[in-house]
Amino acid sequence: MSENNTRLTEYGWNATLSNTFTTLAPPDSAPGRVLRVDRGRCDVAVAGGTVRALSGGDPLCTGDWVTVAEIPDSREPEMHTVTSILPRTSSIVRSSSSGKSEGQILAANVDTVVIATASDGDVDLGRIERLLALTWESGATPIVALTKSDAAHYISDTLTQVCAIAPGATVLAVSAETNEGMDVLDAVLDGTVAILGPSGAGKSTLANALLADTTGADRLETGRVRTGDGKGRHTTVTRELIPFSGGRTLIDTPGLRGVGMWNAAEGIDKTFPEIEELIAECRFSDCAHNSEPGCAVLSALGRGDIDERRLASYRKLQRENAWNAARSDARLQAERTREIKVISRQLKSHYRGRDR
């Protein structure tokens, strides 16, 4: 690892990244990590500090490792541009909130995802399952944090409910106010950590508690939830990567109103392993699990071995994922058709010129 890049170690720089940079980096460029992105520009941590850069051609997101180069004779002093994006080890992707037939990357190169859910009110099990599917699909390790546990009336029952729908994931009851469970949460976090959840889940409060040893003060703005419906205000308006203790980094994200599935088939399977095991036992390989004879899923439902709500959630995520995949395929096919038409016109123009 180059001594010139040792400052980047607090953002996760390591020997593997150094080798990748040496192999793939364009000439006269330097490595950096994207801290935040806004309006076609980004803040990038580099060996000498933080620089402002143009985002370049490809879509960037917080957590990306990139190469940057200074723009000569720029009107803005020391302005840089992103010249390439190093290969991502993971990416958290949801269907675009704009409704376009493409995915939206929420964060890149994430090792651990904290799914924050307020436990002082009704806990949305379906939303947790959605976020688990996104996390498993990304390749990161999920941790479900039931926040505000000091204000929850039935935290033990809530823990039992959430553990039942999150096989393979760590589930913790935590309170940033009383520090309950915070030492355990801190101990299981590794690498780059992203906190996901709706507004009002206490994400920024949780992040401030984790960052306290590093910054000594609240780094992120927090807000109170509305008393009428318990929903929170969007105090976090952009994704920002911040280094904290143990050589780790933290990404706090804005509250997610919609969490649509995007190419998340494997993530859904990992979120509902008991249903996937039953599907393998169905008599017919193309069983739709509605009324087919020999359906192991329906038999288990009838015996009470699986929960009807959970099966409905599984079906909903599968349908949504298939629909978004079909939209994506249609968009790609349309793009290929347009490309073929352009090439065809170019060829016709070329041969007409030769015939003259």
Image (cartoon, grey):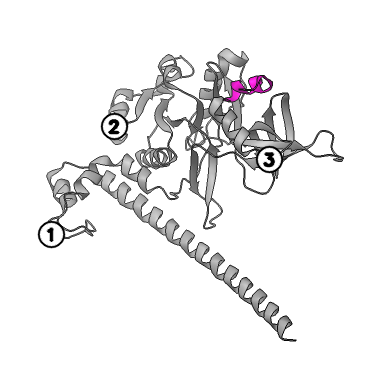
Q: Which residue is mark 2?
A: 161
Residue 281 included in the magenta stretch of the image? no
Q: Nearer the viewer, mark 1 or mark 2?
A: 1
Q: Amino acid at mark 2?
A: Gln
Q: Residue at x 39, y 41 (%)?
A: 133
Q: Which residue is mark 3?
A: 26
Q: Earlier along the polypeptide chain: callout 1 or callout 3?
A: 3
Where does the N terminus fall, quadrant-wise?
Answer: top right
Q: Position of residue 105 (x, y in %)?
A: 54, 44
> Compared to 285, does 33 lie above or below?
above
Q: Residue at x 74, y 34 (%)?
A: 52
Q: Amino acid at mark 3?
A: Pro
Q: Earlier along the polypeptide chain: callout 3 or callout 2?
A: 3
Residue at disc 1, secondary structure: loop
Q: Amino acid at mark 1?
A: Pro
* Quadrant in the picture for residue 243: top right
Residue at disc 3, secondary structure: loop
Q: Residues within 10 Å of mark 3 (few under 14, many from 20)?
A: some
Magenta region, mostly helix, strand or loop? helix
In depth, the one of 268 and 309 nearer the eye is: 268
The label number, if any, that marks residue 293 in the structure image: 1
